[in-house]
Image (tube, helix red, strand yellow):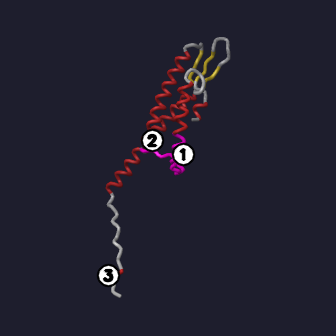
Amino acid sequence: MIACFLPWFAATPAYERIFYYSSFRGPGFLIGICIFLISFSVVVTFLDKILERNAIKMPFSENYFFLGAGIQQVFLIVLMWSVLLATGNNYAEHSLRFGIFVAFAVQICALVATFLNFQLDKQHEAKAFFQHPEVPKPAQSNANHPK
């Protein structure tokens, strides 16, 4: 979410001052808003999971939500990248700034973390499958004891 506020694009029109676009400004502002809203929903869901509030109930694992949101965000960041590069053709000097690279790198790290969390869940399921079940000991009744 923080990377959305950083500069994503800079251009210098002829005989004018340099200007910057973040994810909320410029020709790709709608894509940037979508990226921010998806990031916000992921952060809220993640905080709910960490704090164990269980206020957000999903009919599937949160990992599937994180994976789907991560793939969608990577797609949207690449789409924004191409929009900003096409916008740069209108200016004498232009460049992509560190904000879009930070957003892309953080999203790739998040996808790797989600994949590793999937692997950890599968490992726990496999260990649980191969453990011996715990059989409760029968409680002794007082009827069997002599008085």
Measured as percent of width and height from the top left, residue 4 is found at: 58, 31
- Magenta region, residue range: 42-59
Q: What residue type is disc 1 on?
A: Leu
Residue 91 sits above or below residue 44 on the image: above
User: To which quarter of the image does residue 134 belong?
Assistant: bottom left
Q: What residue type is disc 3 on?
A: Asn
Q: What residue type is disc 2 on?
A: Thr
Numbered disc 2: secondary structure: helix
Please name whichever residue, 69 or 124, is drawn nearer the observer in this view of the structure: 69
Measured as percent of width and height from the top left, residue 11 is found at: 61, 18
Residue 75 sits above or below residue 109 on the image: above
Q: Residues within 10 Å of mark 1 (few under 14, many from 20)?
A: few
Query: How many circles with numbers are drawn on the protein?
Result: 3
Mark in front: 2 vs 3: 3
Q: CA distance from mark 2 to mark 1?
A: 15 Å
Q: CA distance from mark 2 to mark 3?
A: 56 Å
Q: Which circle's residue, 2 or 1, is located before the other in the chain?
A: 1
Q: Residues within 10 Å of mark 2 (few under 14, many from 20)?
A: some
Q: Is residue 129 left or right of residue 85?
A: left
Please name whichever residue, 145 or 99, is drawn nearer the observer in this view of the structure: 145
- Label 2 sits on residue: 114
Residue ranking furthest to the bottom: 147
- Specify the quadrant that holds the N terminus: top right
Question: Is residue 46 one of those drawn in magenta?
Answer: yes
Mark in front: 2 vs 1: 1
- Label 3 sits on residue: 144
- Label 1 sits on residue: 47
Callout 2 touching callout 3 (CB < 8 Å):
no
Numbered disc 1: secondary structure: helix
